[in-house]
Image (cartoon, rainbow, N blue to C red):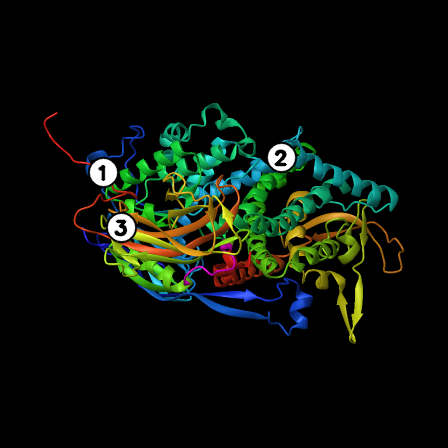
Amino acid sequence: MSRATDESPALQAWPAEPSSLTTGAEGREPAGTDNGGRRSRRRRTTVHTAKPRFSFREYGQYRELFINLTLRELRSKYKRSVIGWGWSMINPLANMAIYTIVFSMLFRIKAPLGVPSVLNSYALMYLCGMLPWTMWQGSIMESMTALLGNQNLIQKTYFPRELIPGATVASKLVSHFIEMSLLMVVIVAVGDWRALVYLPVVLVTIALVVIAALGMALIFSLGNVFYRDIMHFSNILFFIWMFLTPVTYPWYLVAGGLDGGGNFQPPRLVHLLGHTFSLGTLFKLNPMTDAVLSFQSLIYDGALPSSQHYTAYYPITSTGAQGPLTHGYVGAIVSWGDYAYLAAWAIAVFVVGLWLFRRYEARLPEEL
Amino acid sequence: MAVPVVSAEHVSKKFRLYHERNNSIKAAVMRGGRNKMDEFWALDDVSLEVHEGSTTGLVGANGSGKSTMLKCLARILRPDKGSVSTVGKMSALLELGAGFHPELTGRENVFLNGAILGLKQKELQDRFDDIVDFAGIGQFIDEPVKNYSSGMYVRLGFSVAINVEPDILLVDEVLAVGDEAFQRKCLERFSDLKYNGKTVIIVSHSMQSVLNMCDHAIWFQRGKKMADGDPRSVVEAYTGAIVLDEHRPTEKGDRWGSGEARIERVELLDEEGREVTRVRSGEPLRVRLSYATSEPVARPVFSVSVQTLQGLVVSTPTTREADLVPEKLDGTGRVELSLPRLPLLPGTYDLTVSVTDFTLAHPYDVRRNVARFDVDRKGQTEPDGIVSLGGSWGFDA
């Protein structure tokens, strides 16, 4: 009986499925009268000890609550605002407009050229990376607030506490799905049908980002209960992190590649400790770079990881001189190796996050 | 029937008391990673068993560990040692409407709260009308709950919790809220639960409700279980211990007045004139007050007030309605109240004595809770209440 739940043959399935009768306030009949006794009273013994426990079955039992908490997050977010859900569209679009004006018009940064999609739009490139990034950052930041904000729920009721950060992440995922669907519609409308073909890979990538976000949300929201500095620190962390991730600037500035003028920019090199590294390799150590590049590659470029596409371009030398028109293969901005790295990292973060949360969640009612 | 559906084995729960609570990393680094703290055991090796269909009351002073135990049973707190096992669906009513979100409507909150308590969407839909009816919320159900009155809030919370139809219901003093009509409704629901063989565990400071509702009581003191069993004997042991523990009320805080006349001594005497602290229901009791005056006092009135431990005044006989008001009182002397048949039912009572002017408005000396005495059972008495009406029954109307 060391585990959370244990069944003796007679005691199963908890919570018991009550007879689904609706005979009013006084109609509480003995259980097990429904459907010819098929649903006889089944009860399970629950054992609660000092040891942290882990039970998939328990998550199953609290599925309804998870859905409800997620709906609550979604509903309460835009309560009492006139535009309501419109804000979830207006915010990314406003950001897009601002960054497009600053980067594309003021700094005159050329958009990357999608290969093979031939898309040439800073705004669309930005949305491909920014939408997942917003989900990622929002999940983690809002989980911290959510765990603090649900103090009375945690101190007065029992349910697996992971559900609170989990529901925040889920609500972000719902908004993300809507945003991504609209982006897909726009991308297809401007002529790149490939994004639709690669939709399954896009979904897997979203799943990886969500798994990592959940792991981070568990770690950050738990840590923030013990040290409230984490929330303040996170503002800076995510600001720096976003600029270390190619969300607002095109990847060719870092690792070389085709810009919107048809020029093939050379990769940037850095010299560190007597070795020469490609800046792109260093950037890809940041798993969010791999994630964002995957989205840009699949949706904007219309290219699977590690794919090669034959095209024409003007090579640019490291001195900035433009070479003659050349034909050749251009590789996708991510490889399956990068993709595997992202996947491994996401799973690792999730496992560590869940383990830490399980280990310390028992102290939440006291520490909050 | 006698299956333990809730059992706690050697449960201990430790709380950390921080001297300087500071959740910042800087503070943690300065202290070398450790918070300065004391530990104290809110529960210390407590074992208990609750049987199916019983109603169990947890009693004890504030900080005795009874609420901690309830939270451990409800799985809100995880014990540091020992284990708790429960059989069947459990619902905890530690605070009504704990899961309500102020911006959401009553309807949305019912579904959220129901899900916390383990109800499925469909079951909730089936019971939704019952829940709203019971709470008496009416058309306000589609208003955000932040616009509710506190009574509506509480009623809706209770209504959801009680309609979950748990096998085990844990309740922490939530009955202290709501108006009388609603409290009555709640009590009815509790007896329904009991009638249907459900198990109820209730934490209460009201000995009367423990005696009325429970068939089993457990007394906690400083994290330990002191007594476990029949509610009457447990409650008696507990109330008796309050006397031992807190001694007699001290002179200072419980005495006031202008001091021209003072009550120096209060004695409870039985028939033979022996000083007693225990009397039996229906037997004679005399209360003798010894007074002294510092200057002549005109028309003083002596009174003796009998109160229950909950502070309910049973009666306050005075010398005024007995027409025993001297024009002038000087020096020392004694005045005695004689009760030929003490009509109090078994329990513990406190005496407050005073000497005032004739209007009762100006106190010369008041000594609150100056004496405490226990009334024991004598033969058959009414099972519930404070005083014996001593009536007689007869069939054949």
Residue in the foreground of this view, choosing between A228 and B319: B319
Does dot 3 land on a helix, a strand or a loop?
loop
Residue topped by disc 1:
A30
Residue in the foreground of this view, choosing between A241 and B110: B110
Badge 1 amino acid: Pro
For the magenta stretch, what is the residue range? B247-255
- In this view, the residue farthest toward the bottom is A274
Q: Is residue A121 visible to the viewer in this orientation of the structure?
A: no
Chain of the residue under label 3: B
Residue topped by disc 3:
B346
- In this view, the residue farthest toward the top is B139
Are the residues tagged 1 and 3 within 8 Å (C-beta)?
no
| Residue A335 x %, y % | 63, 57
- Looking at the image, is A44 positioned above or below residue A105? below
Question: Could you confirm whether marks 1 and 3 are on the same chain?
Answer: no
Badge 2 amino acid: Tyr
Does dot 2 land on a helix, a strand or a loop?
loop
Residue topped by disc 2:
A78
Determine whether, in the image, residue A273 is placed left or right of residue B230. Answer: right
Chain of the residue under label 2: A
Does dot 1 land on a helix, a strand or a loop?
loop
| Residue B322 x %, y % | 36, 40
Chain of the residue under label 1: A
